[in-house]
Image (cartoon, rainbow, N blue to C red):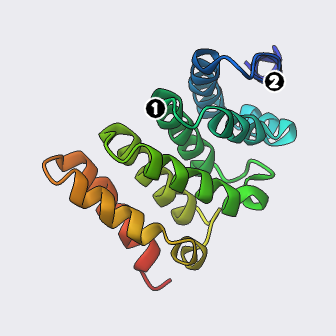
Amino acid sequence: AGRLGLLADVQAAMHTHGGCAELQSLACIAIACIVNSSADNRAEAGRLDILGEVQAAMRAHPDFETLQQVACGTITFVALYNDCAGIKARASALLLDIRTAMQRHARGSIVQEKACDAIRCMIGSGVASAAEAGRLGLLSDLQAAMRAHSASVIVQVSCCQAIASITSDK
């Protein structure tokens, strides 16, 4: 995928068609799959600053729930491989975008789950700091998610993992 330049093509499509939330969602899924497939693709994602496009999509379509959930999933995949250049520079802004997704889609259990996973992966991989997540108020958002989705085991597990990543002494 990297040798073919697919990430650059996906990025160009996102940039050209920023107003199409469905395309942005599908592009986020493609990015996650491509990044997951090889170290070369992860390096290419860093060179292209691909998370800039993911952020732009989240911000352009804050009310499109599916986009928010797949964007959080894409952030998770990229954070798992923190060798992608540029993610650390974006960490605080990404945490804020994740927080916004959680707040705007408080009733969406999948958004909450994916947001929690992204927070946990960003902190666990060293991309973001637990202190920064705490300072940004993410613990209150995690608490709200737990309360709103008390019947969902998967949300509860994801929230607990994210809370542990923020509150653990490292």
According to the image, label 1 marks what residue? Answer: 65
Give left or right: position of 26 versus 8: left
Instruction: Give the residue drawn at x 74%, y 47%.
Output: 84
Name the quadrant of the N terminus.
top right
On the picture, is 67 further left or further right than 153? right
- Image location of residue 159, percent across then percent down: 32, 59
Secondary element at tag 2: helix
Dot 1 lies on which element? helix
Q: Is residue 58 above or below residue 113?
A: above
Residue type, numbered disc 2 = His
* Quadrant in the picture for residue 31: top right
30 over 56 or under it: above or below: above
Q: Nearer the viewer, residue 15 or 8?
A: 15
Categorize mark 2 by other alpha carbons within 10 Å: few (<14), some (14-19), many (20+).
some
From the top left corner, tell me how far across and down residue 91 is, in percent: 68, 60
Which residue appears farthest toward the left when viewing the image?
151
* Residue holding disc 2: 15
Q: Residues within 10 Å of mark 1 (few under 14, many from 20)?
A: many
